[in-house]
């Protein structure tokens, strides 16, 4: 069982009994008192008066039988455990005694039977105090909050509500399928309610509540301790190192759901049932039992939220906020009275503090992106480290969209330029323009603006466009393959993928225009020898320059890399092939043909396959084609052939 009594720091029944019953051993003072002297003349003896005095004599036998001080047997024996039927008769006798005392006080306050009745009442209350203590102590496992909370509130509240209507036989035969554990707990709850009703009705509610609170509070405190919930102090939390704080938060996250949905709920069910006779006592008793544990439990998030904030800690705060959100309906249901308002106030305060801290961290994170001023250039136009870290962070935020939707509902977004606001909203469909979608899209837009600045650090304009294509493609793929695809949607992905293609097109135009323009416009027509040779020289120089640079450039995504190679090859290889075939016969008459015609059409496809892998040769040369003309030697063999 969850609340099994530990061997150490356990509750000691006999030690506590002496302190609980110290006042009772002297005298019990009910809420009413009998007059010591009256100057009224004695009334006439009536039939009803005789009956009431006779009732006092009748109950004397059973009450004195169970006088805790009458014998060693009654001191160690439990009335309700020994014979529950006789326990019910004892309760009935005490109630009869109470009615007789009320009648005598009203009709004959000088009756000598009142003194006897008062003595019998005090004896009976001592017995019931002891029985209450014994039942609570003996059934710690049977009345644990885990078992109680597993029952529906409706079902559990019906156990023993009308104890007189539920005979011993009914309790023993109610549903053969009920487990022994539940049967015992049902009996215990029924007996506790009978005792509490009787003691409260006789004016001894204070003594009843005192015993109940001591034992039940010890059960709650022990359970919370086993869940890892200790007394949280602000100074201690602030001084904790990162590892210790993480461990404390992890324990809290694991314990909170159990505490609310099991411990506090179970105690509410039991307390409502046992003290159903008095709403005031019921609420006061429940609050006193769980207030210390509940306030301490709900206070930790507020203390954590006050500690030093960093971007990484936002996820712990969100998880704590989610824990509050998940259990909030049960929390409101359990602590729904004026007496427990302090507990709800603490829970609400922690929730607000968590939300404010999340707001602040998000604002700081956005500001960190905007203020980044590093001048580091990513070699080859690859993925910038900022792109990776920011997108990992944002995608992790998207994993908590449910909590963020509530947190960001009243989040004041930074003032933005109108054109940026328009761009942001245009990227989202109207159905996706909630607080989470807009904020996550805005953070990505802030990143894209910063990447535009990073692109300007590249001296080669074509490399700047390749850098933007690489990074935006990474961002789109991160959205497509993570939880971000749900808040941002397919329209966002489609619109930004078009931007990737636009950047790629701009890269091609800037990087390969010189190579393409080195060939004559009408490449299929034969040229004069001088023009043909000059065209070859220009093409060789332009292609080798482009090849030399772009073998050191990077496109990390394989699909995008292949798309770029194929697109370049489609533009370059057919045009060069027509020029090559139209002028090869003329150029073959040259004695230095291998130096003049350095590339065959097939060579171009092989060379293009080397692009975008982040490697480069020392002289830009390449291995010889298997076809006709030779090409400069190379330390790198072509990785694949681009066919058109």
Image (tube, grey):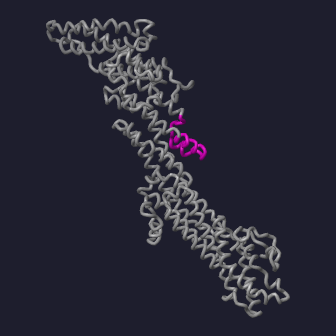
**Main SS of the magenta segment?**
helix
Q: Examine the rendered structure and indicate whether residue 119 appears above or below residue 206.
A: above
Q: What range is drawn magenta here?
A: 227-253
* Among the 4 quarters of the image, the one containing residue 372: bottom right
Q: Residue furthest right?
A: 591
Quarter of the image for the C terminus: give it. Answer: bottom right
In magenta segment, residue 247: yes
Give the x, y percent position of residue 434.
43, 59
Give the quadrant of residue 553: bottom right
Q: How many marks?
A: 0
What residue lies at 74% left-to-right and 74% top-to-bottom? 607
Q: In this rendering, would 33 be left or right of 272?
A: left
Q: Is residue 596 left or right of residue 328?
A: right
Q: Which of 105 and 475 is in front in this view?
A: 475
Residue 494 coordinates in the image, percent (x, y) = 52, 66
| Position of residue 351 measured from the top left corner of the image (x, y, whole percent) | 44, 47
- Residue 533 visible from this viewpoint: yes
Q: In the depicted view, which residue is nearer to us: 116 or 249?
A: 249
Where residue 405 appears, x then y in whole percent? 44, 54
Can residue 498 be found in the magenta stretch?
Answer: no
Question: Which residue sits at x=73%, y=76%?
Answer: 604
Locate residue 397 relative to residue 196 in the image: left or right: right
């Amino acid at each position: 069982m969850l609340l099994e009594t530990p061997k150490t720091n356990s509750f000691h029944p006999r030690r506590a009994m002496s302190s609980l019953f110290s006042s009772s051993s002297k005298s019990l003072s009910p809420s009413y008192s009998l007059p010591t002297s009256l100057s009224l003349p004695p009334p006439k003896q009536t039939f009803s008066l005789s009956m009431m005095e006779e009732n006092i004599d009748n109950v004397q036998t059973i009450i004195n039988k169970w006088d805790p001080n009458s014998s060693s047997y009654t001191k160690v024996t439990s009335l309700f455990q020994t014979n529950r039927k006789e326990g019910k008769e004892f309760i009935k006798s005490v109630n009869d005694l109470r009615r007789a005392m009320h009648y005598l006080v009203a009709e004959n306050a000088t009756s000598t039977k009142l003194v006897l009745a008062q003595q019998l009442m005090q004896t009976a209350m001592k017995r019931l105090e002891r029985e209450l203590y014994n039942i609570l102590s003996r059934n710690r496992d049977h009345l644990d909050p885990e078992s109680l909370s597993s029952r529906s509130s409706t079902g559990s509240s019906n156990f023993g509500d009308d104890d007189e209507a539920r005979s011993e036989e009914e309790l023993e035969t109610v549903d053969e399928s009920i487990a022994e554990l539940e049967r015992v707990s049902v009996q215990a709850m029924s007996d506790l309610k009978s005792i509490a009703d009787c003691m409260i009705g006789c004016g001894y509610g204070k003594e009843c509540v005192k015993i109940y609170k001591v034992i039940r509070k010890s059960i709650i405190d022990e359970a919370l301790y086993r869940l890892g919930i200790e007394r949280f102090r602000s100074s201690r939390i602030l001084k904790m190192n990162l590892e210790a704080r993480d461990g404390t938060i992890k324990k809290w996250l694991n314990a909170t759901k159990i505490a609310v949905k099991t411990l506090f709920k179970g105690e509410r069910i039991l307390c409502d049932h046992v003290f159903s006779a008095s709403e005031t006592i019921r609420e006061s008793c429940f609050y006193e039992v769980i207030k210390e544990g509940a306030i301490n439990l709900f206070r930790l998030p507020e203390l954590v939220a006050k500690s030093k904030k960093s971007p990484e800690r936002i996820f712990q705060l969100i998880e704590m906020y989610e824990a509050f959100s998940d259990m909030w309906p049960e929390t409101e249901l359990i602590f729904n009275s004026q007496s427990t308002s302090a507990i709800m106030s603490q829970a609400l305060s922690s929730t607000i503090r968590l939300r404010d801290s999340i707001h602040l961290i998000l604002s700081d994170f956005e500001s960190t992106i905007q203020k980044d001023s590093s001048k580091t250039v990513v070699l080859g136009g690859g993925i910038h480290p900022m792109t990776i870290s920011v997108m990992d962070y944002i995608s992790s935020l998207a994993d908590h969209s449910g909590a963020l939707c509530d947190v960001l509902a009243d989040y004041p977004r930074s003032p933005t330029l109108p054109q940026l606001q328009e761009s942001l909203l245009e990227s989202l469909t109207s159905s996706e323009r909630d607080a989470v979608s807009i904020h996550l899209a805005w953070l990505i837009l802030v990143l894209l603006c910063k990447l535009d600045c990073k692109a300007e650090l590249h001296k080669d304009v074509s490399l700047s466009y390749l850098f933007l294509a690489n990074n935006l493609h990474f961002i789109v793929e991160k959205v497509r393959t993570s939880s971000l695809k749900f808040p941002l949607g397919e329209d966002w992905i489609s619109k930004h993928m078009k931007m990737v293609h636009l950047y790629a097109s701009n890269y091609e135009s800037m990087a390969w225009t010189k190579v393409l323009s080195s060939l004559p416009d009408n490449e299929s027509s034969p040229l004069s020898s001088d023009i043909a040779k000059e065209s070859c020289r220009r093409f060789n120089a332009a292609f080798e320059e482009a090849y030399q640079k772009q073998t050191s450039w990077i496109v990390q995504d394989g699909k995008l890399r292949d798309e770029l190679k194929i697109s370049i090859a489609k533009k370059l290889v057919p045009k060069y092939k027509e020029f090559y075939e139209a002028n090869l016969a003329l150029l073959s008459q040259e004695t230095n043909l291998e130096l003049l015609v350095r590339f065959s059409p097939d060579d171009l496809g092989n060379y293009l396959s080397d692009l975008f892998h982040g490697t480069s040769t020392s002289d830009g040369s390449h291995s010889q084609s298997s076809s006709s003309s030779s090409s400069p030697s190379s330390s790198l063999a072509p990785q694949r052939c681009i066919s058109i």
